[in-house]
Amino acid sequence: MPEEQSLTTNSCRLYLKKCLFKQKALFFVVILVVTLSLYRKLILFIMIKRRFIIILISLFALSSSITAQEWQRSQEGVRRGQMERPKFVFLFIGDGMGFHQVSMTEAYLSSQKKEISNQSLSFTRFPVMGMVTTFSANSYITCSSAAGTALATGIKTNNGMLGIDPQGNKLKSIAYNIKERGIPVGITSNVTIDHATPAAFYASSNSRNNYYEIAVQLPSSGFDFFGGGGFAQPTGPNKDQKDIYSVLEEGGYTVARGIKEYMSKKGAKRVALFQERGKEADLPYAIDRSESDLTLKQVVAAAIDHLYGTKGFFIMAEGGKIDWAGHSNDAKTNILEVLDFADAVEVAFNFYQKYPNETLIIVTADHETGGMTLGRERGYELKLNELEPQKRSMAVDKEGTPAYAELNKKANVGWTTSSHTGAAVPIYAIGPGSRLFSGRMDNTDIPKRILRIFGIEQ
């Protein structure tokens, strides 16, 4: 019996040892499986991480490569841009044309269709737009001669001065820089050609009012085309000087009085186109114009016709009577002058459509005139249809001025001054180099950028 118990005990112990071994073996197997599983996951994680790192490195390398390629392309673009400078450059200056004059004109066009909207003008459709500060050297509110000097030379001067700095030193217009490069130059306006803005591009004087002194400087400029209004003082302030038209002819210019005469004299080296004989000074307002009157649109077309060639050209064209209508606080006349100006720009735009890779058009203003507002006193109405009865300008129909002023009130058009304001003015551009005229700038920046586009150092 004791032996049987001993055997049984030993068997149990052996069985328990076997069971314990099996448990340990099973535990080891489980541990091994778990370890292998974890190891496999670790290996998989490392492989994924490695691939992720490789992808990141590849993306970084690709990004660096793209950045380098973009930089190279941009540099090539700059070089191409330098080679593809515009040959033909137009600078249109709407004298007295602020943002409100433009908006008012667009609103007027819409009102003609009985719509409440803004119908775009030829130049407000341009892709590039900015704003321009206009202060002079001695006043936040500039006069036209100081603004004209800034736009022509890139340097500010005092109000009343023309083509000279505040110390009296003569300044050089960019038109001379361009002409010296062998590029034909044209200066045009619908006011007299000796007036502040056009004069700033070819003359200099202590006073903008020295019209005859300014006019006699025109022949020595050697510019290829002048056109528009005649002269304020063709025989001097006392009418005792040599006739300015004779001075021009002696200076090598072919004077054409009217479009028909211009067409008969085509082929002349240098041309000065003015109104027909018997019609002197500034061109008539659009509202007062007859069919036989010369227009800014015609003058710009003639300038293109005369200057076009392989060397390109530079044309400055001023819509000067926007300013004059602003001084009169004459809304209807002002609006029609902006439209007339837009028609002249349209001529240049048609040219641009033929030569889009070679033509740059810039449209801006020298200052705002009149402090025009779309709305006056209280209320939220603009009734531009109330202006329709007006058929003549206040400047021509002085007796009708009180009635026309009343129409301004009925239309809810406001004015703050009969002079200039210090408001910034718009700038629009299209064509190669146009992006230089985007955003905020000073009026002195415009001529500097034009020279830069031509590749000319000032």
Image (spheres, rainbow, N blue to C red):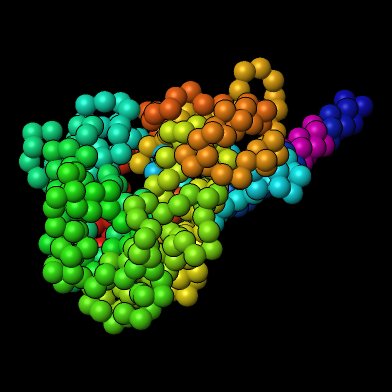
Q: Is residue 21 magenta?
A: yes
Above or below, 71 against 24 in this view is below
Coordinates of residue 176 in the picture (x, y in percent): 17, 59
Total numbered labels placed on residues in the image: 0
Coordinates of residue 314 in the picture (x, y in percent): 30, 64
- Seen at 39% across and 44% down, the residue is 95
Q: Which residues are magenta?
A: 13-25
Side (left or right) of 347 relative to 95:
right
- Seen at 41% across and 75% down, the residue is 260
Q: Main secondary structure of the magenta part?
A: helix
Side (left or right) of 119 relative to 113:
left
Q: Which image quarter is the N terminus in?
A: top right
Q: Would residue 457 be seen by someone viewing this image from the given angle?
A: no
Above or below, 154 against 188 in this view is above
Of residue 23 and residue 131, the one placed in the foreground of this image is 131
- Seen at 35% across and 81% down, the residue is 264
Q: Is residue 171 magenta?
A: no
Of residue 253 and residue 394, the one placed in the foreground of this image is 394
Q: Would residue 243 be seen by someone viewing this image from the given angle?
A: yes
Of residue 417 and residue 81, the one placed in the foreground of this image is 417
Residue positioned most to the right: 1
Coordinates of residue 417 in the picture (x, y in percent): 44, 24
Q: Which image quarter is the C terminus in?
A: bottom left
